[in-house]
Image: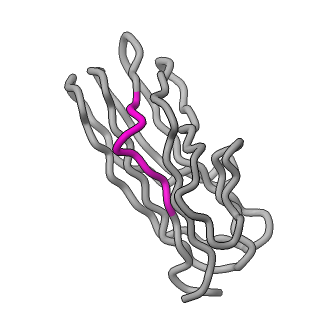
């Protein structure tokens, strides 16, 4: 397919606050074939309607009691990833979802959530957020 595709990575680690979903700052493009990824809002808004395969790798660099991940479409629709329910360093959340995008206004970001005490720092490497058009609509 010649549809839109991108990969973005973070340029630095990011600390999550307890009890709130946080959009992950994937602010460095590896590539963006159709200029549909915004490095300031961390959102992918493709201009071709269809089904997109979204992937994310989020890595913790500090222990926590519970760590969740998800994709958030248009600020309301959640596609949940992993749930880590133990304290450990260097947990990798690798998750994906096939999400329909209308090709004009739909956008998706990757998010993480910390439940429990303390703060959680997510690493800047190896982490990435990506998507590609799997099938046009």
Instruction: Using the image, determine if residue 49 lies above or below residue 122.
Output: below
- Image quadrant holding the C terminus, namely bottom right
Furthest residue in direction top, as rendered: 118
Q: Nearer the viewer, residue 127 or 105?
A: 127
Query: How far across and how far down the image is residue 123, in percent?
Result: 38, 32
62 sits to left or right of 27: left
Total numbered labels placed on residues in the image: 0
Query: Of residues 118 and 15, which is closer to you in this image?
Result: 15
**Above-or-below relation of 24 to 98:** above
Viewed as shown, does residue 12 lie left or right of 61? right
What residue do we see at 57% from left, 47% from top?
28
Which image quarter: residue 61? top left
Residue occupying the point 56% across, 65% down: 6
Q: How is the image coloured?
A: one colour
Residue lying farthest right?
Answer: 104
Quarter of the rendering containing residue 68: top left
Residue at image position (54%, 32%) is: 21
Where residue 24 sits: x, y (%)?
Answer: 54, 38
Location of the N terminus by quadrant is: bottom right
Residue 95 at what x, y percent from top left?
A: 36, 55
Percent coordinates x, y for residue 10 in the rendering: 50, 41
The verdict on residue 89 being magenta is no
Instruction: Identify whether 24 is placed above or below 134.
Output: above
Residue 60 or residue 74, whichever sits in front: 60
Specify the segment rendered in magenta: 122-130
Left or right of 34? Residue 92 is: left
Residue at (61%, 65%) from the top-left corner?
A: 32
């Amino acid at each position: 397919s010649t549809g839109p595709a991108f990969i973005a990575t973070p340029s630095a680690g990011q600390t999550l606050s307890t009890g709130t979903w946080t959009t992950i700052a994937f602010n460095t493009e590896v590539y963006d074939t159709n200029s549909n990824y915004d490095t300031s809002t961390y959102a992918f808004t493709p201009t071709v309607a269809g089904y997109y395969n979204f992937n994310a790798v989020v890595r913790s660099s500090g222990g926590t009691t519970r760590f969740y991940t998800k994709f958030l479409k248009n600020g309301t629709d959640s596609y949940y990833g992993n749930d880590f329910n133990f304290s450990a360093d260097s947990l990798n959340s690798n998750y994906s979802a096939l999400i329909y995008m209308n090709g004009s206004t739909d956008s998706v970001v990757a998010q993480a959530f910390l439940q429990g005490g303390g703060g959680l720092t997510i690493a800047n490497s190896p982490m990435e957020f990506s998507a590609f058009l799997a099938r046009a609509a």
